[in-house]
């Protein structure tokens, strides 16, 4: 058994106190009566009402109050099956966190610009589920699909190029992980890949075709400049020029009927990609079957109503015939 408002159970102490007062009611009334009259007059003075039925009415009222208190505490027991629905789409962001994303041909850096774009995207969605994949030499699922956007923003704040498990850029690994991260059996899932396009492993195209067969559409966002930026190679220490490879990113999108967008400081591409997603994808209804405890407060509310009705029909007055017979005997 579970109580939604267990702190209100303390109110039952009031009922216990009232029960105690009812039990001692007769003695207290008789003691007060004796201050003004002799004790043998007590039964004569109150003979028009039955002491038993007066006390019974008060007991019934106390029981009704107890039932009302239990009802507002909201007891729950017995599990029931319930289906929940939420409208929206599943969207996963795959973010390149390789060392080339530290290049500052986009201020403050390519990676920071990508994270800013995703945050701006999150501010404009409502019912969609969002997931985060970070990839360099390997890919990791940083945040499974969720509609808790604050949690997603916390994950974004922890992403950097300094804690990657393996250097390099393996877009294919990110695509393979994305294929498993989406809910199976659903169509028209959306993957937004943000990278400078330098695929050092060269396995992206094969994985892109796999995603297309699963109904996953890829939109790519290129970060950086075609002219490139000089960075230090993480393994050799040599200085190399890292350039934005727009053609490779555009090809990945083309295979799955998606679009390529180049990230700009103004962020206009966020509006374009949102419009593209919502115009082309039908919002789905996500259904989930869960077990929940069944509310039982109505049982106690009904009991309280019955007790109040019972109290209202109880007449504590003694019948006139009985009173007349007693008067005759006394005479």
Image (cartoon, helix red, strand yellow):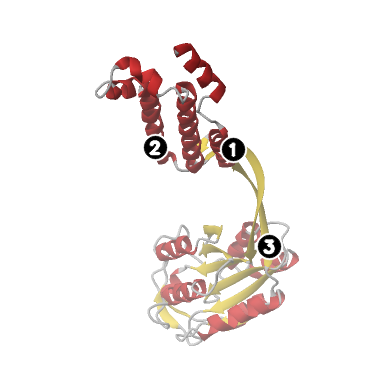
Whole-Å distance between the Cαs marked 2 and 1?
Answer: 19 Å
Element carrying mark 1:
helix
Of the two numbered discs 2 and 1 on the same chain, state the one appearing first in sequence: 2
Rendered image: mark on residue 14: none
Q: Nearer the viewer, residue 44 or 307?
A: 44
Q: Position of residue 301 (x, y in %)?
A: 55, 40
Q: Residue sitting at 39 percent across and 80 percent down?
A: 104
| Horizontal relation, residue 124 to residue 233: left or right | right
CA neighbours of label 2 inside 10 A, class few (<14), some (14 to 19), many (20+):
some
Taking depth in this image into account, of 145 and 137 the one nearest to the observer is 145
Q: Kindly report the distance in space between the C-alpha atoms of the residues bearing marks 1 and 3.
A: 34 Å
Note whether 310 is above or below 181 in the view shown. Answer: above
Badge 3: few (under 14), some or many (20 or more) residues near its Cα, within 10 Å?
Answer: few
Q: Which mark is residue 11?
A: 2
Q: Is residue 196 above or below residue 74?
A: below
- Observer-nearest of 101 and 166: 101
The reply to whether discs 3 and 2 touch (Cβ–Cβ < 8 Å) is no
Q: Secondary structure at mark 2?
A: helix
Q: Quadrant for residue 237, please give it.
A: bottom left
Instruction: Name the residue: 70% across, 71% down.
Output: 282
Reading the image, the residue beneath label 1 is: 299
x and y percent of residue 115 in the render?
A: 45, 72
Are the two marked residues, 1 and 3, in contact with CB atoms closer than 8 angstroms? Answer: no
- Per the rendering, the mark at residue 285 is 3
User: Residue at the left extreme?
Assistant: 35
- What separation in Å lies between label 3 and label 2 (alpha carbons)? 43 Å
Instruction: Please tell me how crowded label 1 is: few (under 14), some (14-19), or many (20+) other residues with Cα within 10 Å.
Output: few
In the picture shown, does residue 294 fall above or below 242?
A: above
Q: Quadrant of the C terminus?
A: top left
- Is the Cβ of the residue at disc 2 closer than 8 Å to that at disc 1? no
Give the mark nearest the N terminus, 1 or 3: 3
């Amino acid at each position: 058994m579970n109580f939604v408002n267990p702190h209100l159970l303390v109110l039952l102490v009031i009922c216990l106190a009232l029960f105690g007062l009812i039990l001692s009611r007769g003695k207290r009334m008789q003691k007060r009566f004796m201050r003004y009259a002799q004790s043998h007059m007590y039964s004569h003075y109150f003979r028009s009402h039955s002491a038993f039925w007066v006390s019974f009415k008060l007991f019934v009222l106390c029981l009704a109050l107890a039932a009302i208190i239990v009802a507002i505490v909201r007891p729950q027991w017995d599990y029931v099956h319930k289906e929940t629905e939420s409208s929206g789409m599943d969207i996963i962001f795959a973010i390149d966190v390789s060392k080339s994303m530290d290049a500052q041909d986009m201020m403050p850096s390519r990676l920071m610009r990508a994270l800013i774009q995703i945050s701006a995207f999150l501010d404009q969605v409502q019912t969609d589920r969002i997931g985060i994949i970070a990839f360099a030499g390997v890919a990791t699922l940083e945040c499974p699909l969720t509609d808790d956007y604050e949690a997603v923003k916390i994950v974004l704040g922890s992403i950097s190029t300094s804690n990657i498990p393996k250097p390099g850029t393996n877009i294919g690994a990110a695509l393979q992980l994305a294929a498993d991260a989406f809910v199976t059996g659903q169509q028209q899932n959306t993957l937004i890949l943000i990278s400078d396009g330098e695929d050092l492993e060269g396995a992206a195209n094969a994985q892109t075709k796999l995603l297309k067969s699963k109904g996953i559409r890829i939109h790519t966002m290129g970060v950086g400049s075609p002219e490139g930026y000089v960075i230090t190679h993480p393994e050799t220490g040599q200085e190399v020029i890292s350039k934005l490879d727009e053609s490779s990113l555009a090809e990945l999108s083309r295979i799955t009927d998606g679009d390529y967008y180049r990230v700009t400081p103004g962020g206009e591409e966020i509006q374009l990609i949102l419009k593209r997603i919502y115009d082309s994808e039908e919002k789905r209804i996500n259904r989930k079957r869960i077990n929940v405890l069944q509310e039982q407060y109505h049982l106690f509310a009904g009991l309280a109503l019955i007790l109040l009705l019972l109290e209202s029909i109880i007449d504590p007055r003694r019948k006139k015939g009985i009173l007349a017979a007693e008067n005759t005997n006394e005479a």
